[in-house]
C-alpha cells in the first residue's frame, strides 16, 4: 500500500468516525494550560480519583443523597445501590445479586433455589454462568486488595518473573472444579450459550486446553458454536500449540469449521486472528495480508483499521500498539521520522489541522517532527516552527531543547541564546544541570561582538541567580567556569570575583585557563591587589598551576613589598623561580 | 436583616434570644429556630483599628456599597418579580460556602461567588497556593461530583490561584 493511499484513508476517516472506538484522556482543561504530558496525566488522574472518592462516599451514604429536586429525574445523579435489598430465596434476589456482581452470594442463592426445588429460568442461568465465568468464581476485588492466589497463580507468577504490577494481582486463574463447572454439570440441558460462557471464561483465565476439550464436547453433543466461542478459541490457539505452522493450522481449521457451521465472523474474530498471527513468527506477514483482504471482502471494519493492521505487520511497531488507539498508533508508527522523511512530516503536520485529528496525536509526534526540523532545516524555518508549536502543541523535554541549541550552533545564531534561556526557564527545565551547562558552554566558547557579550553576561547573571535559588542542585565546575568567563568578557569584574568565591562554597575547582584569564583582566584593569588575592585563592585550592600564576603576578605587576611577601611567603619556591 | 426565622409551623411564642435555640412544646412537634440578632449597622462591617489588620477589597467595603462599588456574591434569578425559590437558593448557598470553606480549608483567599446559569451551578473561588496542584485537582473533582449528586444539577468549579491574599488596605 503506498503512502498516498494511506493518507487518503486518514484524511477521509477523521476522528468522528472512530470516536466510540478510541479512548481520549480528558484533557479539556489541560490543553489550554501549557503542561508537560506527565503533568497532564497526573492532574487528570487526580481529578478522576477525586471523583471516585466522591462516588464512594455517595454510594456508602445513600440516604443523604436521595432527595430528588430534579424534574425530570436524572438517574445518573442518584446514589447507586451497592448493597443487597432482597433477602428472601427467590429468582428476583438472584437477579439482583447478578446485577450487583456479587459472585459468591449469587452462587449461594442459586444453590438455595435448587435445594428448595424452584426451577430457575434459562435466561437467569445464562447470566449466572456468564457472571461466574467472567470473574472466575471470585468476587471482583474491592478496594484494590490483592487476592491470595492458589498454586496455579504461583506458577503464573514464576513464569512472568518481571516487575509485579497491580494488574498481575487482578488476573484471576481458573480454579479446578469450580462452581461454574459444577453448575454446568448440574444443568439438565445445556445449550450454546452455556458452553459459550464456560469456554470464554476458560480462555480469559488461562485454562486453554480445557477450553478446547469443552469445544469438542460441544461438537459431540451436536451443537453449533457461536461467533464468540470461535473468537475466544482463535485467540487461545497460540497457547495450545508450540510450533508456528501448527498454530496457523489450528487457526485455519477453526475458521473452516466456522464456515461449515455457517457462523459469520465479526470484527472481534478478525482481531483475534491478527493478534494470534503476531505470535506465529514468519507466517505472520503472508497470512496477515490474506486476512486483511478477507476483511475487506466481507466489509468488516473500515479502511483505517485495516491500515492500522498493515502498519502493525509491515512496519514492526509492535511495541507502540495499545488496544484501542488505532489511528494514534498510525501516526506514531509512520516511521517517517525515523526514516528521515521530512516531506512526510510536513504532510502529517498539515493533516493535524483537519477536523479533530489533533486528538489523535500521541505525545511524541511533535517531538520527533521538531527533532527532524532541527536536523535538516535552516534555522529560520526551525524558529518559525518553534514559535508555532511550542509550547501549545509540544512541550519540549530537555532533549528537544538540546536539538534546538545544536541547530542554533550549526547556523551560527548564538546571539539568540539569551531568549532561549528565558524559554528554558518558563518551561521549567532550568533545574537540569546538563542542559544549562550546554547552554553556557555554547555562549562561552568564542568571543563575540560587544553587544552580544553584554547580553550573554546578563544571561549568565540570570543563570547565577537561578543557582542561588536552588541550593540542592549540584552545579558542575564547567558551568561555574563558563559563567565567570562570560562575566569577565563583558568586563563585569566584580561579579566575576564573586563567582570565584562561589567555587570554594560549592567545592569546585576553577580551571587554569580561567585563572590566567582573570589575571590578564586584572592586569588590564591595573589592579595589583586583586592579582595577589587571585594567587592566594589559587594557593588555597592547592592548584598545581599556582606557581605559574605567582610567577606571572610577580613579573607583570608592580607590587609593593607587602604584596610580594603575601605571594612568596606561603611557598618560598616562587621566589626561586621569579 | 435583623433576625432570621426558620419556622416549621406557626410560632408558639416569640422570644428575644441571644443564641440560636429551638423551642418545642411538650404536646407536639412545633418548633422555632432563631439565630443571633445582627443589627444593620454592624453587619459585614470591619471597624477601623490600629492599622495592622490586612483587609481585602470585599471586606473593606460595607454592604451599602453593594451595587455601587461591590458586586454580588450570589447570582440567581429567584429575586425577580414572579420568581420563587429564593429561600431555597439561599440555603443552598450557605451550605455551599461552608462546604467549600471546609474542603479547601485554609486555601480560600476571598469570598466564594456562586452563579446560577440555567441548570448549572457555577462556583467561582480564588485560592491560595497552599496545596500542590494535584491535590487541588483531586479536591475539585471530589467537590464537583459530590455537589452534583447532592443538588441533582451540574456543578462546575472555577478556581484561580494566587500566591497571597490581595490586601486592599490595612485597618
Image (cartoon, rainbow, N blue to C red):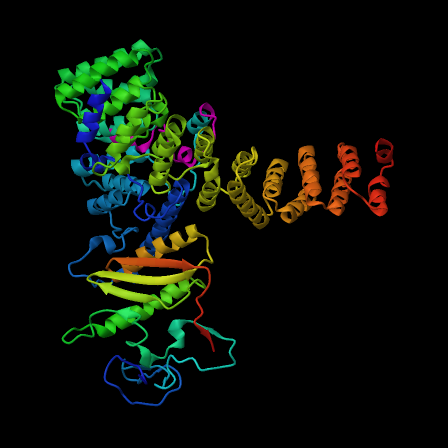
Residues in magenta, as a range: A158-184
Q: In which image quadrant can residue B34 be found?
A: bottom left
Of A359 and A277, nearer the camera is A359
Tell whether position A303 is magenta: no
Tell whether position A181 is magenta: yes
Q: Looking at the image, can residue A164 be seen?
A: no
Q: In which image quadrant can residue B44 be found?
A: bottom left
Of A28 and A313, nearer the camera is A28
Image: A521 above or below A229: below
Q: Residue at x 13, y 21 (%)?
A: A298
Residue A238: x percent and y percent?
32, 17
Q: Looking at the image, can residue A348 be seen?
A: yes
Image: B135 above or below A267: below
Q: Is residue B126 left or right of residue B32?
A: right
Q: In which image quadrant can residue A147 be found?
A: top left
Q: Is residue A539 left or right of residue A141?
A: right
Q: Residue at x 27, y 55 (%)?
A: A79
Of A230 and A471, nearer the camera is A471
Q: Is residue A42 left or right of residue A101?
A: right
Of A38 and B142, nearer the camera is A38
Residue A478: x percent and y percent?
61, 35
Residue A241: x percent and y percent?
33, 14
In the picture, the quarter occupied by the N terminus of chain A is: top left
In the picture, the quarter occupied by the C terminus of chain A is: top right
Q: Is residue B28 left or right of residue A410?
A: left
Residue A98: x percent and y percent?
25, 42
Image: B55 above or below A548: below
Amino acid at each position: 500500500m503506498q503512502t498516498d493511499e494511506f493518507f487518503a484513508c486518514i484524511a477521509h476517516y477523521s476522528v468522528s468516525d472512530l470516536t466510540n472506538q478510541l479512548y481520549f484522556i480528558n484533557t479539556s482543561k489541560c490543553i489550554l494550560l501549557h503542561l508537560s504530558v506527565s503533568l497532564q496525566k497526573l492532574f487528570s488522574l487526580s481529578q478522576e480519583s477525586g471523583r471516585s472518592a466522591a462516588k464512594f462516599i455517595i454510594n456508602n451514604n445513600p440516604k443523604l443523597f436521595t432527595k430528588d429536586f430534579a424534574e425530570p429525574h436524572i438517574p445518573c445523579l442518584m446514589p447507586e445501590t451497592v448493597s443487597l435489598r432482597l433477602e428472601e430465596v427467590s429468582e428476583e434476589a438472584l437477579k439482583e445479586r447478578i446485577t450487583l456482581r456479587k459472585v459468591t452470594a449469587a452462587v449461594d442463592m442459586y444453590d438455595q433455589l435448587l435445594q428448595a426445588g424452584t426451577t430457575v429460568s434459562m435466561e437467569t442461568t445464562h447470566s449466572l454462568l456468564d457472571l461466574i465465568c467472567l470473574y472466575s468464581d471470585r468476587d471482583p476485588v474491592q478496594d484494590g486488595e490483592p487476592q491470595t492466589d492458589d498454586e496455579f497463580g504461583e506458577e503464573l507468577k514464576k513464569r512472568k518473573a518481571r516487575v509485579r504490577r497491580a494488574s498481575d494481582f487482578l488476573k484471576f486463574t481458573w480454579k479446578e472444579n469450580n462452581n461454574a463447572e459444577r453448575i454446568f454439570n448440574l444443568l439438565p440441558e445445556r445449550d450454546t450459550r452455556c458452553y459459550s460462557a464456560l469456554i470464554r471464561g476458560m480462555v480469559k483465565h488461562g485454562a486453554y486446553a480445557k477450553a478446547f476439550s469443552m469445544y469438542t464436547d460441544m461438537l459431540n453433543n451436536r451443537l453449533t458454536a457461536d461467533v464468540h466461542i470461535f473468537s475466544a478459541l482463535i485467540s487461545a490457539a497460540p497457547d495450545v500449540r508450540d510450533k508456528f505452522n501448527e498454530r496457523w493450522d489450528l487457526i485455519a481449521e477453526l475458521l473452516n469449521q466456522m464456515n461449515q457451521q455457517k457462523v459469520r465472523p465479526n470484527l472481534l474474530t478478525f482481531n483475534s486472528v491478527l493478534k494470534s498471527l503476531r505470535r506465529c513468527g514468519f507466517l505472520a506477514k503472508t497470512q496477515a495480508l490474506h486476512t486483511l483482504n478477507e476483511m475487506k471482502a466481507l466489509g468488516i471494519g473500515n479502511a483505517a483499521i485495516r491500515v492500522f493492521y498493515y502498519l502493525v505487520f509491515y512496519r514492526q511497531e509492535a511495541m507502540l500498539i495499545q488496544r484501542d488507539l488505532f489511528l494514534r498508533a498510525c501516526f506514531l508508527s509512520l516511521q517517517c521520522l525515523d526514516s528521515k522523511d521530512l516531506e512526510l512530516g510536513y504532510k502529517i503536520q498539515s493533516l493535524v489541522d483537519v477536523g479533530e485529528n489533533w486528538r489523535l496525536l500521541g505525545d511524541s509526534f511533535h517531538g520527533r517532527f521538531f527533532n527532524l526540523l532541527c536536523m535538516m532545516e535552516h534555522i529560520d524555518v526551525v524558529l518559525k516552527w518553534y514559535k508555532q508549536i511550542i509550547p501549545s502543541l509540544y512541550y519540549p523535554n530537555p532533549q528537544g531543547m538540546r536539538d534546538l541549541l545544536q541547530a542554533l550552533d550549526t547556523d551560527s545564531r548564538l546571539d539568540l541564546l539569551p531568549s532561549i534561556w528565558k524559554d528554558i526557564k518558563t518551561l521549567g527545565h532550568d533545574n537540569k544541570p546538563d542542559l544549562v551547562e550546554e547552554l553556557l558552554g555554547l555562549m562561552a566558547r568564542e568571543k563575540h561582538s560587544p553587544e552580544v557579550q553584554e547580553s550573554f553576561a546578563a544571561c549568565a547573571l540570570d543563570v547565577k541567580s537561578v543557582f542561588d535559588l536552588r541550593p540542592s542542585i549540584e552545579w558542575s565546575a564547567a558551568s561555574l567556569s563558563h559563567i565567570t568567563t562570560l562575566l569577565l568578557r563583558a568586563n563585569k569584574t566584580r561579579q566575576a570575583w564573586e563567582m570565584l568565591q562561589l567555587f570554594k562554597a560549592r567545592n569546585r575547582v576553577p580551571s587554569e585557563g580561567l585563572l590566567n584569564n582573570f589575571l590578564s583582566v586584572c592586569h588590564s584593569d591595573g589592579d595589583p591587589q586583586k592579582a595577589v588575592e587571585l594567587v592566594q585563592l589559587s594557593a588555597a585550592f592547592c592548584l598545581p598551576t599556582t606557581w605559574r600564576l605567582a610567577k606571572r603576578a610577580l613579573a607583570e605587576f608592580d607590587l609593593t613589598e607587602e604584596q610580594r611577601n603575601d605571594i612568596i611567603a606561603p611557598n618560598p619556591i616562587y621566589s626561586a623561580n621569579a | 436583616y435583623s433576625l432570621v426565622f426558620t419556622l416549621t409551623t406557626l410560632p408558639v411564642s416569640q422570644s428575644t434570644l441571644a443564641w440560636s435555640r429551638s423551642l418545642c412544646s411538650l404536646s407536639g412537634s412545633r418548633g422555632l429556630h432563631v439565630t443571633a440578632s445582627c443589627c444593620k449597622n454592624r453587619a459585614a462591617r470591619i471597624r477601623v483599628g490600629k492599622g495592622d489588620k490586612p483587609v481585602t477589597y470585599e471586606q473593606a467595603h460595607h454592604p451599602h456599597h453593594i451595587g455601587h462599588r461591590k458586586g454580588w456574591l450570589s447570582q440567581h434569578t429567584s429575586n425577580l418579580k414572579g420568581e420563587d425559590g429564593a429561600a431555597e437558593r439561599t440555603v443552598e448557598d450557605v451550605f455551599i460556602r461552608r462546604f467549600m470553606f471546609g474542603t479547601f480549608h485554609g486555601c480560600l483567599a476571598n469570598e466564594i461567588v456562586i452563579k446560577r446559569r440555567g441548570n448549572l451551578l457555577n462556583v467561582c473561588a480564588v485560592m491560595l497556593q497552599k496545596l500542590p496542584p494535584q491535590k487541588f485537582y483531586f479536591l475539585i473533582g471530589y467537590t464537583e461530583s459530590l455537589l452534583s449528586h447532592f443538588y441533582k444539577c451540574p456543578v462546575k468549579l472555577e478556581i484561580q490561584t494566587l500566591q497571597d491574599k490581595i490586601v486592599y488596605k490595612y485597618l
